[in-house]
Amino acid sequence: MIAPSSTGTLTGGALEGIGEENVAGDAAQPIDILALQETTSNSTTVQPIADALNAFYAYHTNQAGYAISPVQGTQSGSASSGNGPNAVVYNTNTLQLVASVGVGTPSGSGNGEYRQVMRYEFAPASVTAGTNNEFYVYVSHMKSGTGSTNAGYRNEEAAIIRNDSATLPSNARVLYMGDFNSSGSTDLWYEAMIAAGANAGVDPLNPTNTTVINWGASTTTTNILAAMDDSSTNLRYRDAYQFMTSNVLYGVAGGLAYVPRSFHIFANNGGVAYNGAVTSSTALNSDLTTNGVGLAASVLYTDLSTASDHLPSVADYTIPTGGAAHHRRRRRPATTARSVPAAP
């Protein structure tokens, strides 16, 4: 994701490109929250990503200060069999991590949770954290695979998430993000995430809660293609989601708020054909603020084809900081560079 260029100069790779993208009129800025799945561990996989981001931004006037959660997520089985735990990297210049909580005990087929869901509580940096500015981020990686058994596991994990978020304040601002390994709003897990109740999730690509959408079928319909993130070299599924509570989606005053129309799959504007590769995309050709020194779109397409099996999902939000709301970008690559096999 971040590597030296052919000249030996450290570049930010795909993560640099995300920070150089202009979204829905919101100016380019470094990543603030990077939610990860399929890590090996915090020390082996996650800390090196934070270190690399810090090294890259050390060459820029807007130096970042990236850190990771001190809590290690768990999983059922080893990283070679379970794909690896969920994790987070965040920018300490803009955010403070208030708490990290592992949700549920991964028991595989015993309870449907194969990788522990992680819940992170954030507030703006350099202010007193309180109910008026805190928000929660759940990071999930649901069971992969087709068939009713695997679908049942995903539904069980959705129940674990919703049961936990129901213990939060009823007006909490919550993001549910990750790799949900399923492409249809007809699926039971999807319906569980958007079901009425405390802190219900809303999909910004389906705010009316329509339950007949299939984002994983051969099509030429642009808005369906634009939602697909898996895989970067053979686009055919939507696995990446950022559900959010309605107060976030509709920008209710007093806390975290979604920037309308900013959720998207990085480098995919619907122009990549079904079963096509990101290298054929044109989505970034006119959307990057490079100032003559950033990565070209053509380089990013190549980086994305090798950095991850998924394309990153991206969204912008505003947070209150000392009485004013400022745009902050929370972006999520769907997975780290693929180093372990897919979950069975």
Image (cartoon, helix red, strand yellow):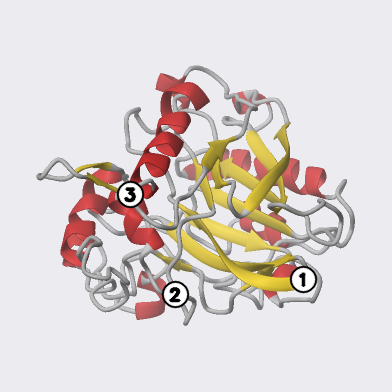
**Tag 2 secondary structure:** loop
Extreme-top residue of the structure: 78
Q: Are marks 2 and 3 in contact (CB under 8 Å)?
A: no
Q: Residue at x 52, y 65 (%)?
A: 315
- Which quadrant is the C terminus positioned in? top left
Q: Residue at x 23, y 75 (%)?
A: 285
Which one is earlier in the sequence, the residue at label 3 or at label 1? 3
**Tag 1 secondary structure:** helix
Q: Which mark is residue 23?
A: 2
Extreme-left residue of the structure: 6
Q: Quick check: 141 left or right of 297? A: right
Whether residue 22 appears in this view of the structure is: yes
Residue 107 position by quadrant = top right
Up the image or down, 136 lies above or below 197; here it is above
Pair 2/3: label in front = 3
Q: Alpha carbon of mark 3 to alpha carbon of mark 1: how far?
A: 38 Å
Q: Alpha carbon of mark 2 to alpha carbon of mark 3: how far?
A: 24 Å
Q: Quick check: 271 left or right of 47? A: left
Q: Nearer the viewer, residue 238 or 307?
A: 307
Q: Which mark is residue 59?
A: 3
Q: Which mark is residue 247?
A: 1
**Tag 3 secondary structure:** loop
Percent from the top left, x then y, of residue 64?
48, 49
- The residue under label 1 is which amino acid type? Asn
Percent from the top left, x then y, of residue 225?
35, 71
Whether residue 87 appears in this view of the structure is: no
Percent from the top left, x then y, of residue 146?
45, 44
Q: Quick check: 327 left or right of 30? A: right
Which one is earlier in the sequence, the residue at label 2 or at label 3? 2
Up the image or down, 112 lies above or below 323; here it is above
